[in-house]
Image (spheres, rainbow, N blue to C red):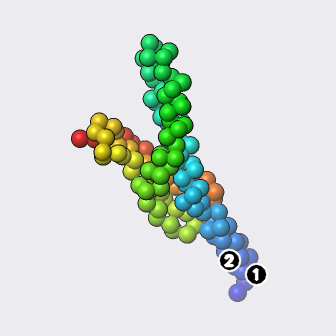
């Protein structure tokens, strides 16, 4: 084997090994998804309240989201499927609460690679 080929093989093996070692695990994804969901709900729900209601309830809305984080984290954990491909993972989360009609359902897909998360698909759908 030529020295150049051997060096290329070693570099490739090291790169693949590095990606495998830094492929984020489900606990890291839960933390990421919880932060993203909380920020989304704060921005889209609490910050979008009509002015008279916002004056009265905006702080309570934020506190409600913070108080509900353990339940939201459990929902994320229970409704997430991980496709682990070694060097990276794809997480698919379906956030919905069928017991409460009228709440939208959210579908989120996230790429996890090299210790990072990249959400490439997020869509909300009304529940029947």
Mark 1 Cα-neighbour bin, 10 Å: few <14, some 14–19, many ≥20: few
Mark 2 Cα-neighbour bin, 10 Å: few <14, some 14–19, many ≥20: few
Residue plotted at (52% across, 55% down): 111
For the N terminus, the image quarter is bottom right
| Spot occupied by residue 12 in the image (x, y as percentages of width and height) | 66, 72
User: Which residue is at the front of the view, 52 or 105?
Assistant: 52
Residue at the far left in the pictured view = 128
Residue 77 visible (yes or no): yes
Residue plotted at (48% across, 21% down): 57
Residue at the far right in the pictured view = 3
User: Which residue is at the front of the view, 61 or 92?
Assistant: 61
Residue plotted at (64% across, 57% down): 115
Please name which of the two marks, 2 or 1, marks the residue nearer to the observer: 2
| Spot occupied by residue 27 in the image (x, y as percentages of width and height) | 57, 58
Residue 120 visible (yes or no): no
Residue that label 1 marks? 3
| Spot occupied by residue 127 in the image (x, y as percentages of width and height) | 28, 41
Label 2 residue SS: helix
Residue that label 2 marks? 9
Position above or below: 33 against 87: above
Residue plotted at (55% across, 54% down): 29
Q: Is residue 114 left or right of residue 128?
A: right
């Amino acid at each position: 084997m030529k020295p150049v080929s051997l060096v290329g093989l070693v570099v490739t093996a090291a790169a693949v090994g590095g990606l495998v070692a830094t492929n984020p695990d489900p606990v890291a994804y839960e933390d990421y998804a919880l932060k993203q969901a909380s920020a989304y709900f704060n921005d889209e729900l609490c910050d979008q309240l009509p002015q008279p209601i916002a004056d009265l309830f905006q702080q309570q809305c934020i506190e409600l989201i913070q108080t509900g984080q353990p339940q939201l984290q459990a929902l994320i954990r229970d409704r997430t499927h991980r496709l682990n491909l070694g060097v990276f993972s794809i997480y698919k989360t379906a956030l919905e609460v069928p017991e409460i009609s009228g709440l939208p359902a959210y579908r989120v897909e996230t790429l996890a690679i090299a210790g990072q998360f990249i959400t490439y698909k997020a869509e909300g759908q009304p529940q029947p």
